[in-house]
């Protein structure tokens, strides 16, 4: 487990009221920016492999996920491991015990991955 603080990126749900939440687990959580959060072990969920922790990427790229109603954010992570994934799933994932949401990225910062994902909708 790596303990140093690292910059990463996470795709999160952007609600109509302007608040943000996780995509798949703990859906009622309202994500606060600027404070450290510890991951919760949400147990197993049908259709998902058991991989506890905050799932993040090394770049704002997750071609297997739709961008509709979602936003990419820059985060800081601590106490994390990397999990090898194929490029069509954005490459290696970060599974972090601790996360701090820093800022929402502007669409211009998504690069080609945003355009690729946008076209799938």
Image (spheres, helix red, strand yellow):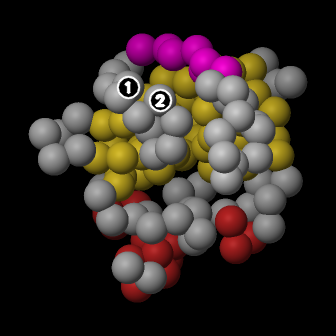
Residue at the image position 38 percent from the left and 79 percent from the top: 121
Q: How far apart are marks 2 and 1 (CA)?
A: 6 Å
Query: Which residue in the rendered view is the most extreme toward the bottom?
Result: 119
- Does dot 2 land on a helix, a strand or a loop? loop
Residue 31 seen in the figure: no
In the rendered image, which quarter contains the N terminus? top right
Residue at the image position 67 percent from the left and 53 percent from the top: 47
| C-beta proximity under 8 Å, tags 2 and 1 | yes
Residue at the image position 71 percent from the left and 34 percent from the top: 44
Query: Which residue in the rendered view is the most extreme toward the left?
Result: 17
Write down the residue under mark 2: 26
Residue 98 or residue 107, whichever sits in front: 98
How many tags in the picture? 2
Residue 70 or residue 48, whichever sits in front: 48
Image x and y of residue 33, in percent: 35, 24
Which span of residues is magenta-colored?
Answer: 35-41
Write down the residue under mark 1: 29
| Vertical arrangement, residue 84 with respect to residue 66, above or below | above
Residue 39 or residue 114, whichever sits in front: 39
Q: Quadrant of residue 32?
A: top left
Residue 79 relative to residue 70: left or right: right
Q: In which quarter of the image is residue 69?
A: bottom left
Image x and y of residue 94, in percent: 71, 41
Residue 26 or residue 31, whichever sits in front: 26
């Amino acid at each position: 487990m790596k303990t140093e603080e690292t910059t990463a990126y996470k795709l999160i749900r952007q609600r109509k009221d302007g608040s943000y939440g996780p995509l798949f687990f703990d859906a009622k959580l309202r994500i606060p920016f600027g404070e450290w959060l510890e991951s919760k072990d949400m147990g197993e969920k049908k259709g998902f492999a058991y991989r506890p922790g905050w799932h993040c990427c090394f770049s704002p790229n997750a071609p297997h996920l739709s961008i509709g109603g979602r936003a990419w954010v820059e985060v800081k992570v601590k106490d994390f491991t990397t999990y090898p994934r194929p490029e069509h799933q954005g490459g290696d994932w970060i599974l972090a015990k601790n996360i701090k949401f820093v800022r929402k990225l502007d669409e211009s910062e998504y690069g080609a991955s945003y355009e690729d994902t946008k076209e799938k909708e």
